[in-house]
Amino acid sequence: MSRVNKKKIVLIFLIIIILFFIGSKFFLGTQDSSQDYKKYNDATGLCDHVVDGDTLDVSGVGRIRLVGVNTPERGELGYKNATDFVKEKCLGKTLYLDIDDAKNKDRYGRTLAVVYVDGIGNLNKELLQRGYAEIMFIPPSEFNPHDWA
């Protein structure tokens, strides 16, 4: 095989590898493939009930309010879509919670957290990016939802 043919083969191989990585990033979208959240979480539990798009119950932890986001309430446009999305992604699955260190409970006693779930990563961020939620930043909070939008 000539030197020119070897160079062409190597070049084609490199292009294929680059396209593979670009395509993987494109098709995976916003999913968190690193799964570092499994190592760096404050609490873990099974989601046994979804109240609505931004509130759910986690066994062993209690009621969780997704920090930094607000989804439509019952009777409002978008309520069913947001709630159904959270049910599909969370119900019956293990959730990893990053509890807000600046303010860990809201006025109703719900734990304020970023919720991570396999296959999607940061649920709070995903709700914003899919248009199911709006930013609701209430200081103090260690999380800035403006970084997620």
Image (cartoon, rainbow, N blue to C red):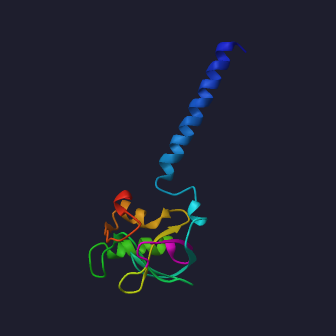
Q: Residue at position x 35%, y 85% from top?
A: 107
Q: Residue at position x 56%, y 78% from top?
A: 92
Q: Is residue 125 magenta?
A: no
At which x and y percent is residue 94? Answer: 58, 74
Please state, as top left, top right, bottom left or bottom right, where the N terminus lies in the image.
top right
Residue 130 seen in the figure: no
Q: Nearer the viewer, residue 118 or 140?
A: 140
Where, by quadrant of the figure, is residue 68 drawn?
bottom left
At which x and y percent is residue 87? Answer: 46, 75
Please state, as top left, top right, bottom left or bottom right, where the C terminus lies in the image.
bottom left
Residue furthest out toward the right: 1
Q: Residue at position x 52%, y 57% from top?
A: 32
Q: Nearer the viewer, residue 24 or 123?
A: 123
At which x and y percent is residue 35? Answer: 58, 60
> How many numbered badges does the structure rendering display?
0
- State the extent of the magenta-drawn residues as a range: 90-104
Q: Residue at position x 48%, y 47% from top?
A: 26
Residue 25 seen in the figure: yes
